[in-house]
Amino acid sequence: MTSPTSGRRHTVIGLALTALMLFPVYWMLNVSLTPQQDMRKTPPDLLPLHPTFEGYRAVLDDQMPYLAASLLIGLGTVALTLVLAAPAGFALAKLRPLGGRLLQLALLVAQMIPGIVMAMGFYGIFLDLGLQNSWWGLIVADSTIAVPFGVMIFTAFMSGIPGELIAAARIDGAGTVRTFWSVVLPVSRNALVTVSLFSFLWAWSDFVFANTLDGGGDLRPITLGIYKYIGNNNQEWNAIMATAVIASIPAAILLVLAQRYVAAGVTAGAVKD
């Protein structure tokens, strides 16, 4: 039984660690409100004593097309990942195809390949086909990271669906596709939310693929749009941090809304009855 003193000590330690992890977020917000002339002040102000919203005005004037491009790429990555990963997970979990275990091993190995290696491979392919700076090209590239993860999550979750449920659907005359669409997917909500969230966040925060496959056109994600404020002799730090703050809002909202589904989706299959 934990004593009150020990419980308070754990609470203090937890709060201290939380504050330490959240400090970069606070500092990002602080710098986004700091006037440009105060950026090199020593020591720096721990609070924005003379806050300015010039950085946020610059973001709203310049960065909206980049945010829209990131949103398009993120949603496209989610759609492509679900279309590929959900049926594959169902097949590995319930249909047990020949070579299924080998495929699962291949998916696990694919997660270990560094992103820069994959990006260079895509660069050569896209260069030969003239597909650089295409939004759907980035969707395909980002999906190569998300699909293996999605297949493993779906496989683990769908393995826990009772076989009786599948058998009942087949007795009622449902084929494999109908069983998957009408029975398995509706009860796989936690896995769907988990895979969708991580797919979107990977695409939203991607820099390696975006920077490698960008051809210098107008359709660029926010991770590249932020470079608009970085020059050889000048860095607009309040605009840079304001862009980071605004770009973090969609991810933070999604994480808050989906956290209980993610906890269930990630732990699916960890415990066997």
Image (cartoon, rainbow, N blue to C red):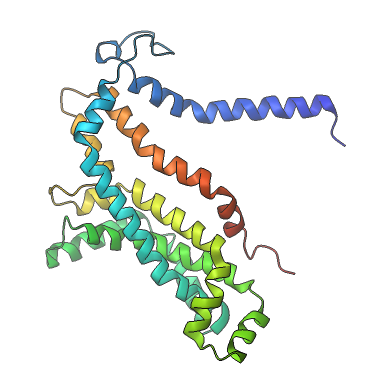
Residue at left 69%, top 24%? 12
As drawn, the residue found furthest toward the right would be: 1
Question: On the picture, is 200 further left or further right than 219?
Answer: right
Q: How many marks?
A: 0
As drawn, the residue found furthest toward the front would be: 172
> Residue 264: x percent and y percent?
61, 57
Q: Is residue 205 visible?
A: yes
| Figure quadrant of residue 64 | top left
- Percent x, y of residue 123: 20, 59
Q: Where is residue 219 in the image (x, y as percent from the top left)?
A: 18, 49
Q: On screen, 208 above or below 60?
A: below
Most foreground residue, 200 or 258: 258
Rendered-image quadrant of the C terminus:
bottom right
The answer, for residue 98, to whether it is visible in the render is no
In the rendered image, the quadrant that contains the N terminus is top right
Query: Which residue is pictured at 40% across the width and 11% down the height?
Result: 45
In the picture, measured across the screen, residue 116 lies left or right of residue 176, that is left
Q: Where is residue 19 in the image (x, y as percent from the top left)?
A: 56, 26
Instruction: Say whether residue 174 is left or right of residue 162.
Output: left
Q: Residue 122 is drawn in which quadrant? A: bottom left
Toward the viewer: 255 or 45? 255
Residue sitting at x 26%, y 57%: 138
